[in-house]
């Protein structure tokens, strides 16, 4: 199935959601540091995992439960399986991991959308999902 969401719209939602997820992670880390106020709680690896888990739950929960994140809602599109149903936790996990891979390769997984005949990014293709305008 073909996606009708442009790369620009996708990147707009990613930026919007990135700021929201970062703010949420910043708040959670602040609460943890206030509650446990210990030097060991401030290790880089601990903070990295808190941020990673926050991003993971923000995106996957939004995709599975509501079909869209707040950024996707603002940019007026949602995610669904190729058969039109809501995505599963497994598909959300695959999308999340491949999104990280796409970012760490300078966005190549998203640029792939420009060359795909169905207008799908790499994470869409391998998770059997697609983005559609509302």
Image (tube, rainbow, N blue to C red):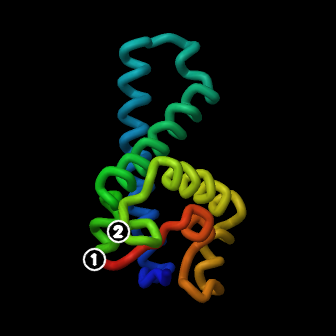
Picture residue at 37% right of the left edge, 64% below the top: 85
> What secondary structure is found at the residue carrying circle 2?
strand
Instruction: Indicate the position of residue 62 as horizontal and vertical percent values.
Output: 35, 52
Viewer-proximal residue, 43 or 117? 117
Q: Position of residue 80 (x, y in %)?
A: 40, 66
Say left or right for 132 vs 124: left
Q: Is residue 54 above or below residue 93?
A: above
Q: Give the side of residue 47 with respect to residue 13, left or right.
A: right
Q: Residue at x 52, y 49 (%)?
A: 90
| Mark 1 surroundings within 10 Å by alpha-carbon count, few (fewer than 14), some (14 through 19), many (20 or more) | few
Which residue is most to the right?
105
N-terminal of the pair, mark 2 or mark 1, is 2
Which numbered circle lies on residue 78?
A: 2
- Label 2 Cα crowd, 10 Å radius (few <14 / some 14-19 / many 20+): many
Please give the residue where the numbered disc 1 appears in the rendered image: 134
Q: Eyeballing the image, is 10 above or below 115?
A: above
- The single residue placed furthest to the front in the displayed view is 83
Residue 47, position in %: x, y?
Answer: 55, 30
Q: CA distance from mark 2 to mark 1?
A: 7 Å
| Label annotation for residue 16 | none
Q: Which is more toward the observer, 120 or 20? A: 120
- Decide if residue 126 is on the left or right side of residue 3: right
Labelled pair 2, 1 in contact (Cβ < 8 Å): yes
Q: Quadrant of residue 66?
A: bottom left
Query: Residue 15, position in %: x, y?
Result: 44, 63
Q: Residue 58, relative to residue 12: is it above or below?
A: above
């Amino acid at each position: 199935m073909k996606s009708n969401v442009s790369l620009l719209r996708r990147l707009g939602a990613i930026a919007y959601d990135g700021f929201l997820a970062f703010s949420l992670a910043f708040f959670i880390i602040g609460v943890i540091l206030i509650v446990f106020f210990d030097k060991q709680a401030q290790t880089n690896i601990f903070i990295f995992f808190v941020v990673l888990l926050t991003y993971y739950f923000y995106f996957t929960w939004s995709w599975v439960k509501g079909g869209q994140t707040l950024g996707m809602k603002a940019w007026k599109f949602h995610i669904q399986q190729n058969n039109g149903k809501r995505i599963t936790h497994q598909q959300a996990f695959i999308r999340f991991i491949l999104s990280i891979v796409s970012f760490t390769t300078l966005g190549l997984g998203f640029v792939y959308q420009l060359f795909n005949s169905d207008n799908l990014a790499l994470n869409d293709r391998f998770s059997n999902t697609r983005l559609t305008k509302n």
